[in-house]
Amino acid sequence: MAETATLATAAGGPKATWTLDAAVIGAGVAGLYELHLLRKQGLAVKAFDSASDVGGTWYWNRYPGARFDSEGYIYQYLFDEDLYKGWSWSEKFPGQPEIERWLHYVADTLDLRKDIVFNTTIASARWDEDAGRWTITTDKGETIDARFLITCCGMLSAPLTSVFPGQDSFAGQILFTAKWPKAPVDLAGKRVGMVGNGATGIQVIQTIADTVGAMTVFVRTPQYVLPMKNPKYTPEEQAAYKAKFEWFQKRLPTTFTGFEYDFEQAWADTTPERRRQILEDVHADGSLKLWLASFGEMFFDPAVSEEISEFVREKMRERLKDPRLCDILIPKDYGFGTHRVPLEVGFLEAFHRDNVAVVSVKDNPIARVTPTGLRLKDGTEYGFDVLIFATGFDAGTGALTRIDIRGRDGRSLKEDWSRDIRTTMGLQVHGYPNLFTTATPLAPSAALCNMTTCLQQQAEWISDCIGHMRENGLAVCEATREAEDAWVAHHEAIASQTLVVRTNSWYMGSNVEGKPRRLLSYIGGVGAYKQRCDAAAASGYPGFAMR
């Protein structure tokens, strides 16, 4: 198997044609590791990315305040001890510039850039049944001929940018958090309209509040928030977490969400006093522990959910004080943990500033963008110099449905997923041979996980599967319909027991009009998911037809 890269003359000039064993879409956390793994096998492989450099999520999301809410020392690759210990985080929850530098360090240490094609967007991919290969085209008209197509596009990489009518009419500047410009943006003294108060919007609001001249935040769905504690690290503290490398390696893939901490106690086995103390302790930790390591019953039991939700509301009321702010900014109609839970630093206090106002648009939604600002349904108008939209993503599916992917008999992935969102363990889709996926629906990597934990696990499984095929002289792998049916049924059986499916959130695809309703993330646990994937590999990949 040898790669060739040739230039073929075509109308408009030379266009590159690659013949590869494998093409990887994306040069973020998953794509870099997949490229490394397949190269180690000796495959001819290249990764392709729309960006001008590596980073994936951390290339595009460079908005003010962007940072981890996984601890830096676990949001890392764990396949190489030297690679892990060769990088030192400056703080517990590093910011985007440092995260981007880390991914550059990874790419350079592993010498990956030579096999990455930047500034290139994959436009289409068509399966050739006779050849048993994918024909892939780029936005520049280039062609890639590959046996395997591996998508590492990211869970949250298809931003919703056409949200309101009239956007093109705005005379000021419109900024999207998911496509924030590299060049510095001067917000000093500006009148800013902020739309979106999820995890991203919260980071922006708390960061720019003391810079802008005035900011009005439009809130449709209030969020439960947890305070972040983000200490700087000394050399001694860096050495201490690096000394736990082997423990992290064994621990992270086995917990419920791929973090170092896990649910350790049952609600029914603790007294009310002990429950309160546990909640106080995990809240004071300044991390996601309250969500991911307090009481798992909050996801299943309405009474437990309400008690924990009220605990978080109480903590928010203590900080907000103002009844009007509490009414707009504290959730009442869904339970804590059934939406993505953001960490914040001074977010609630930002609304006490004289230059920050908040407007509820739950019952009086934004109707349109005007040349001077925003107009609500009741006709109220607000004038701005800058509009910032943190309006979310077509999560899980959007990155792939925006590519024209055609499988057996010309079937369209976009059309298939518009009817029903289905995968086999988030690794393959029936009808699309030799298409392997990461960060797609029905796996924990669909954003209910410390992402590096789950993306590494999926990348390794895909690499091992391809290695198994090569060792056995097999050329094509496709998840069977029976296996996909079984996985979807298993996924639904677990999801249906939770309170998550009773809420409207991007976890359920509710933020995209017409999107089939299904919990995007597998909620059976990271450790349980890995066990199932490992069992399939150890048993010779039942449910994956190979020839």
Image (cartoon, rainbow, N blue to C red):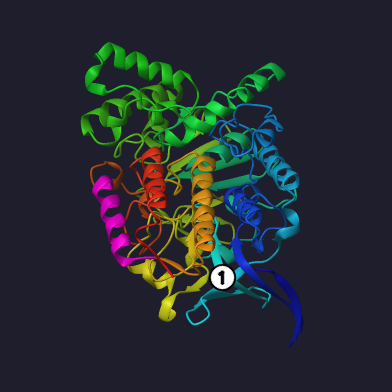
Is 472 left, or right, of 7 in this rendering? left
The answer to whether residue 107 is visible is yes
Residue 400 spot, x, y in % from top left: 49, 64
* Image height of 533 relative to 264, above or below: below
| Magenta run includes residue 334 | no
Residue 225 spot, x, y in % from top left: 44, 32
- Identify the residue shown where x is 59% and y is 71%: 146
Q: Main secondary structure of the magenta part?
A: helix
Q: Determine the secondary structure under disc 1.
A: strand
Nearest the viewer among 372 and 401 is 401
Residue 70 spot, x, y in % from top left: 53, 34
Residue 9 spot, x, y in % from top left: 76, 85
Which quadrant of the rendered structure holds the N terminus?
bottom right
Q: Looking at the image, which residue sits at the far front?
A: 472
Which residue is labeled 1 in the image? 147
Using a 10 Å C-alpha cutoff, classify the residue at mark 1 as few (fewer than 14 neighbours), some (14 to 19) or many (20 or more). Answer: many
Identified by mark 1, the residue type is Arg
- Identify the residue shown where x is 38% and y is 44%: 529
Which segment is the magenta one? 479-495
Which quadrant of the rendered structure holds the C terminus?
bottom left
Nearest the viewer among 249 and 68 is 249
